[in-house]
Image (cartoon, rainbow, N blue to C red):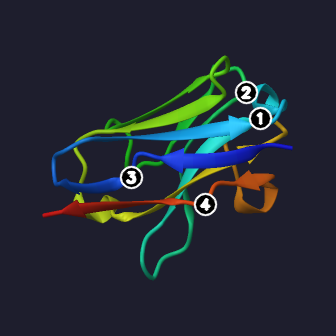
Amino acid sequence: QVQLVESGGGLVQAGGSLRLSCAASGRTFSLAGMGWFRRAPGKERELVSGISRSGGDTYYADTIKGRFTISRDNVKNTVYLQMNYLKPEDTAVYYCAADLRGSHYLTVDRVDAWGQGTQVIVSS
């Protein structure tokens, strides 16, 4: 199994940047596809970005394409989400997730492990 702990959330002005990190424990990290979901107030949890176990395949939601970059370090057992040009509509709780099947396109029903979430607030 894998346990996930996020960090890096906070309050930022529109146009600013944040970098989220997700540290994983357990020996299966390198086998897992990893992703970042977010849930905004009153909305469903949505997949923002995902990366395959090798890092060779990535997914970005249309709403963040060109602004966010996902990456992973299989030596440090960490996945990152670099968020640039943040907008108020990016305000949400961001969750790290692992899919032990290795896919870069994670779905809620196939996630094997979740982080506790980290709050991102973008002020206008």
From this viewpoint, which residue is outermost toward the bottom?
Answer: 42
- At x 74% / y 47%, what residue is drawn? 3
Position above or below: 10 against 17: below
N-terminal of the pair, mark 1 or mark 3, is 3
N-terminal of the pair, mark 3 or mark 4, is 3
The C terminus lies in quadrant:
bottom left
Label 1: element kind = loop
Report if the CB atoms under discs 1 and 2 are less than 8 Å apart: yes
Amino acid type at image mark 4: Gln
From the top left corner, tell me how far across and down residue 55 is, in percent.
63, 22
From the top left corner, tell me how far across and down residue 1 is, in percent.
86, 44
Amino acid type at image mark 2: Arg
Amino acid type at image mark 1: Ala
Label 2: element kind = loop
Category of crowding for the residue at label 4, using alpha-carbon neighbours closer than 10 angstroms: few (below 14), some (14–19), many (at least 20)? some
Which mark identifies residue 32? 1
Report if the CB atoms under discs 1 and 4 are less than 8 Å apart: no
> Between tags 4 and 2, which lies in front?
4
Say which residue label 2 marks: 53
Q: Nearer the viewer, residue 92 or 2?
A: 2
- At x 67% / y 21%, what residue is drawn? 74
| Disc 3 to disc 2, C-alpha distance | 24 Å
Say which residue label 4 marks: 116
| Disc 4 to disc 2, C-alpha distance | 21 Å
Label 3: element kind = loop
> Between tags 1 and 4, which lies in front?
4
Position above or below: 98 against 115: above
- Give left or right: position of 56 versus 2: left
